[in-house]
Amino acid sequence: MITFFTENSSDILLKTWEHFYISMIALLLGVLIAVPIGILLSKTKYVAKVVLSITSVLQTVPSLALLAIMIPLLGVGKVPAIVALCIYSLLPILNNTFIGMNSVNENTKGAGIAMGMTTMQSIILVELPLAIPVIMSGIRLSAVYVISWATLASYIGAGGLGDFIFNGLNLYQTELIVGGAIIVTLLALLADFLLGKLEKWVTPKGLKIEGGRTS
Amino acid sequence: MLKIENLTKVYRGGKVAVDQLNLDINQGEFIAFIGTSGSGKTTALRMINRMVEPTSGKMTLNDKDITKMNPVTLRRSIGYVIQQIGLMPHMTIRDNITLVPHLLKWSKEKKDETARRLIELVNLPPSYLDYYPAQLSGGQQQRIGVLRALAANQDIILMDEPFGALDPITRDTLQDLIKDIQQRLNKTVIFVTHDMDEAIKLADRIAIMHEGKLIQFDTPDNILANPANDFVKEFIGSHRLIQQKPNIKTVDEVMIKPISITIEKSLDEAIRLMVEKRVDTLFVTDGDNRLQGYLDVESFTGARKTKKSVSECYEKDIFYVKTGSKLQDSVRRILKRNLKNIPVVDEEHRLVGLVTRANIVDIVYDTIWGEEEETVQNKKELMSE
Ligand SMILES: Nc1ncnc2c1ncn2[C@@H]1O[C@H](COP(=O)(O)OP(=O)(O)OP(=O)(O)O)[C@@H](O)[C@H]1O
Ligand SMILES: [Mg+2]
């Protein structure tokens, strides 16, 4: 096991970086797409139902199948992998943005409007700040998913830590499989930890007061 | 200033919440909407700032048609205090108070200055400006809710049962506060309440609503003297009707001369004055006879060794009434707050008199003389309030 880490150290660093970078780009795109859509959906409850059920159907497509579908559409390599992972990251973020925006206290929202906020101001000044904790937990959930599924991206030639695992499977080398899996897990934990820090940082201070009534 | 004509709201599903409402409200008036639950008070109020769109009717504000105004601009010009307070939990008290100025894009200096000036109005220290709503008690939060409705110099303020959820003492304090602010800043206030005592205490005119209709719109005295129908009679309660009958006395007629001391005097002088006049309370005033607080036996005990002057140990928290207040209201407050007495001040806050517990006797005496039998029971009601 140790030999795996010592012999492949430069390779491990490279693949870990690759893995990390594919996942993060996919996640970032996912956030950029899902958060605005989630906000829009929270304003149109009827459309929301339809869209959310479509995305949850997408979620049930087996990941390997989704990756395979990408090949005829986008070929092989990092781009199709990122696209596929991005699609996977959408649902949790979309769901949580929608729920987060909807769970903002009606009185608080109504007060903002009654004070003369426009819909846009209400979203930016009231709803989004108050929904942030819920949205962030959706992002954390997606991050863990995306990092573990990015392992499969190796299958369509995107590289990443999946390379060790697939090699290990082909060559019957358990330490490659286990070593790869350990690093993926650590990476997922690390991402979750860092996003947790980020969540604390972006959560408005007024919502973190001990024993306080948050809305 | 605000004219409402044939205002009607029919909700989807056919519920007529407000039915042909007509009101003419003057600048600087304190109006109370009162009525049973579901009588359409909130709906009427929310049509004024267009949180609810009227089905038909006309509303003009300073001769401008409200329904033709931009709702966002309109709302920024009307203060609104909601029952559930509705402070922004993620904003500091400063940002909550200056929410409307922020929307109106005032400069930071002007906003900060406003917040500092306003928080003093409600007797909270400026350090609270950096707190968050969750760090404040319900009563303190509601004060901030009131300030938020004042911050952009709104001329009209709508209040929907703002003090409903507060304990009686906090409520009483905030009632005084809002009345004082309203008079000082000459605001027009429309105030929804369930509580007849609150309406009588605060309002210049009371609008009694029932099932979406306006039943009576008049001054408290006129409503009590001439209730429009049985519903109003029942609503205001028989005890109030009778109470009101004997000549309505004001505090000015019964108040006695209070014993006061100016703030720069020494404690020794204060004690000598107390002994000489045989009183246990001295009212503390400044050079212009303006009421600052009081000094009683309790404020001395122990303090005498360390403190030498009145200014060091007088109590600043003091309840008072203005000249011209109704005696009954003042007596009711003495009883409610368990005070020994209540000082009377004039418009300039100068100490002019004192109403004491002895005046309760006057009232009882009056009532018995005014109304023979019935009034013995009436006295009990008054006492138990
Ligand atoms: N959005 C709505 N849709 C349909 N009906 C409504 C709506 N809002 C209020 N109503 C109905 O309109 C009537 C008047 O309601 P409103 O809230 O104005 O009463 P209110 O006098 O403020 O009562 P309360 O003292 O309980 O606050 C009620 O019968 C209520 O059920
Ligand atoms: Mg109501």
Image: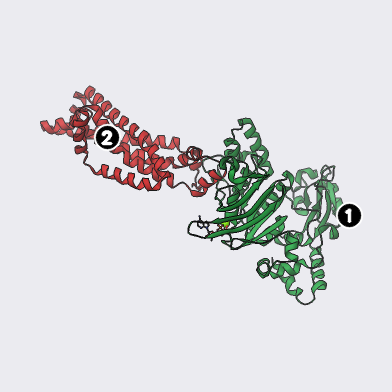
Chain colours: A red, B green
Relative horizontal placement of residue B166, taking residue A8 as reference (left or right): right
- Residue at point 26% right, 42% down? A58
Res. B218 visible in picture: yes
Q: Quadrant of residue B124?
A: top right
Quadrant where the C terminus of chain B sits is bottom right
Quote the CA–CA distance across marks 2 and 1.
90 Å
Q: Quadrant of ligand 2?
A: bottom right
Q: Which mark is residue B340?
A: none
Label 2's element? helix
- In the image, is residue B181 above or below residue A158? below
Name the residue carrying label 2: A85
Q: Locate residue B5, reporting x and y percent.
A: 64, 53
Please give the chain letter of the residue carrying mark 2. A
Residue A190, quarter of the rendered image: top left
Asked whether A68 or B289 is in front, the reply is A68
Q: Amino acid at mark 1?
A: Glu
Q: Amino acid at mark 2?
A: Leu
Residue at point 24%, 44% (across, down):
A60
Residues packed near mark 1 inside 10 Å, few (<14), some (14 to 19) or many (20 plus): few
Can the viewer see residue B131 in this picture? no
Spot the residue most to the right: B276
* Front of the two marks 2 and 1: 2
Whether pointer 2 and pointer 1 mark residues with C-beta atoms closer than 8 Å, the reply is no
Using the image, tell me which numbered label, if any, was put on residue B276. 1
Q: Mark 2 vs mark 1: tell me if same chain.
A: no
- Chain hosting mark 1: B
Of B10 and B304, the residue lying toward us:
B10
Point out residue A198 in the picture as x, y percentages from the top left corner.
Answer: 41, 34
Locate residue B294, reporting x and y percent: 78, 50
Q: Is residue B213 left or right of residue B290?
A: left
Look at the numbered disc 1 and give the secondary structure of its residue: helix
Question: Mark 2 near ligand 1 (CB under 8 Å)?
Answer: no
